[in-house]
Image (cartoon, helix red, strand yellow):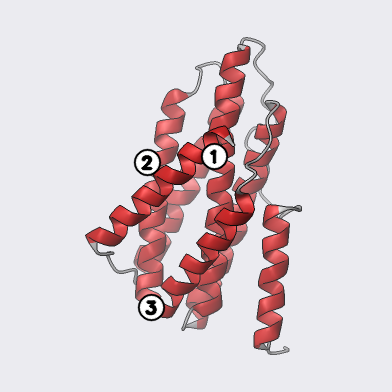
């Protein structure tokens, strides 16, 4: 099996970034949870627009997750940690695909700022990996915990008749909890309170901006 050079890793990550932001991400074997659920005719125009904007936020969140995982995998010290990051990134690609489809079904576009969010998140992920595997895994734990809270808020805002979006968000919530548990069991360390606060504030900026643009 060929050993990848630093240039190989750079090209792989560049390809992944382009696929994530501009192209078609490589998904796993799992089906879209909303595939066989019919669209509700009872959604008003205002409800459709609101849900589409929520799903645009979730899509951008998955862009950020992809970048974080790729950055962490690039700088992980232990091979098994890098493998866990790659598997988590593959499952986040499913979320990315599901969210993008739903955004377009509801008549909206994905965020124009996605390239910026990807680059920023990749740099954060790489820095977390450089800090050490326990901190990198701890970063995953905290990220996923915040994402779960964020998904719960969105589920509470959905119109009751929107079963398609609900199915997607519920499966995403299950997956994010599993990613957090996996990272914790692999040795993730609790992050300092100031780091958690900064992560929360960054997420607030992203969600407020992405809702509109």
- Image quadrant in which you'd find residue 141: bottom left
Q: Is residue 143 above or below residue 189?
A: above
Left or right relative to 105: residue 201: left
The residue beneath circle 3 is: 131
Which quarter of the figure is the N terminus placed in? bottom right
The residue beneath circle 1 is: 210
Q: Pinpoint residue 95: horizontal percent, then vertical percent.
A: 60, 46
Left or right relative to 55: residue 5: right
The residue beneath circle 2 is: 149
- Image quadrant in which you'd find residue 71: bottom right
Please tell me whether mark 3 or mark 1 is closer to you in this view.
1
Q: Is residue 69 above or below residue 57?
A: below
Which quarter of the figure is the C terminus placed in? top right
Q: Residue at x 61, y 11 (%)?
A: 44
Q: Pinpoint residue 169: horizontal percent, then vertical percent.
A: 52, 36
Furthest-left residue in this view:
193
Label 2 or label 3, whichever comes before in sequence order:
3
């Amino acid at each position: 099996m060929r050993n990848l050079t630093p240039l190989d890793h750079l090209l792989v990550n560049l390809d992944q970034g382009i696929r994530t932001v501009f192209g078609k991400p490589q998904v796993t074997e799992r089906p879209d949870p909303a595939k066989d659920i019919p669209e509700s005719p009872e959604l008003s125009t205002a409800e459709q627009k609101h849900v589409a904007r929520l799903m645009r936020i979730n899509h951008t969140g998955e862009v950020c997750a992809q970048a974080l995982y790729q950055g962490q995998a690039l700088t992980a010290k232990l091979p098994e940690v890098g493998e866990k990051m790659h598997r988590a990134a593959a499952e986040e690609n499913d979320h990315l695909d599901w969210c993008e489809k739903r955004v377009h079904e509801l008549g909206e576009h994905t965020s124009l700022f996605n390239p910026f969010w990807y680059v920023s998140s990749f740099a954060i992920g790489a820095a977390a990996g450089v800090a050490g595997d326990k901190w990198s895994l701890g970063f995953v734990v905290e990220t996923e915990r915040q994402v779960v809270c964020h998904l719960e808020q969105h589920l509470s805002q959905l119109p009751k008749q929107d079963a398609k979006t609900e199915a997607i968000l519920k499966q995403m919530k299950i997956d994010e909890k599993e990613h957090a548990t996996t990272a914790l069991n692999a040795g993730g360390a609790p992050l300092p309170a100031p780091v958690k606060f900064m992560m929360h504030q960054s997420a607030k900026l992203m969600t407020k901006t992405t809702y509109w643009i």
